[in-house]
Amino acid sequence: MKKYDAIFLDRDGTINLDPGYINSLNNYEFYEYTFEALKNLKKLTDRFCIITNQSGVARGIIDPDDLSMIHDHILNQFFNHDLNLIGIYYCTDHPDNPTSNRKPGIGMYDEAAKEHKIDLKKSLMIGDSFCDIEAAKLCQMESMLVLTGNGSKTKKMTNINPTYFSKNLLEASLFLSDAQ
Ligand SMILES: [Mg+2]
């Protein structure tokens, strides 16, 4: 079984449903298999890190206080499931005026790597969008495209080239923990 220095996770459409611009904890829902999947993935790494674009803040759709409430909830749920989530890095930039933090920029990965001494080249990114796979490529890490959220649409793009594809996070975790 392959081991990773860290597993980076996208948020919306990867670990939770993506109804678009989640601006309240009431609208935040993990997939029913998320924690089973993460338990499997725990065999491959001892740390997880969430990297998420949240342009809804710059667009005025998401209140930063609600975003931090959602992230506190995620941190608590990981903790309750005995999963080592070392951080939730989020970028509130508007896509029209992005910094290098907004995926596919790798600013957030660099910051996480520096803060937690992560070897990005020995890590894995799991996400549902082009920007997740592209950022992973720029970090020279492996990537897994899940077909939830934007995933099926992303898979049809001609220039998408992840290391692996999977139906969802659970299938990804089974594949990675058993098949390799
Ligand atoms: Mg996503």
Image (cartoon, grey):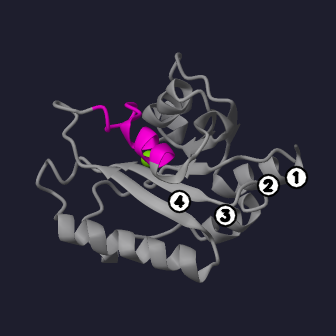
Tags 3 and 2 in contact by the CB under 8 Å rule? Answer: no
Quarter of the image for residue 64 reads: bottom left
Residue assigned mark 3 = 38
Three-letter amino acid code at disc 2?
Answer: Leu
Residue 107 image point, x, y percent? 37, 37
Tags 3 and 4 in contact by the CB under 8 Å rule? Answer: yes
Residue beneath the point at 28% across and 69% down: 68
Residue beneath the point at 66% across and 64% down: 38
Q: Secondary structure at mark 2?
A: helix
Q: Secondary structure at mark 4?
A: loop
Q: Which of 108 and 9 lies nearest the eye of the viewer?
A: 108
Residue beneath the point at 49% across and 27% down: 134
CA–CA distance in space, label 3 to label 4: 9 Å
Three-letter amino acid code at disc 4?
Answer: Ile
Classify 10 Å Cα crowding around label 3: few (below 14), some (14-19), many (20 and above): many
Residue assigned mark 2 = 174
Tags 1 and 2 in contact by the CB under 8 Å rule? Answer: yes
Residue assigned mark 4 = 15
Three-letter amino acid code at disc 1?
Answer: Asp
What segment carries the magenta color? 100-114
Disc 2 under 8 Å from ligand 1? The reply is no
CA–CA distance in space, label 3 to label 2: 10 Å
| Labels 3 and 4: the sequence-earlier one | 4
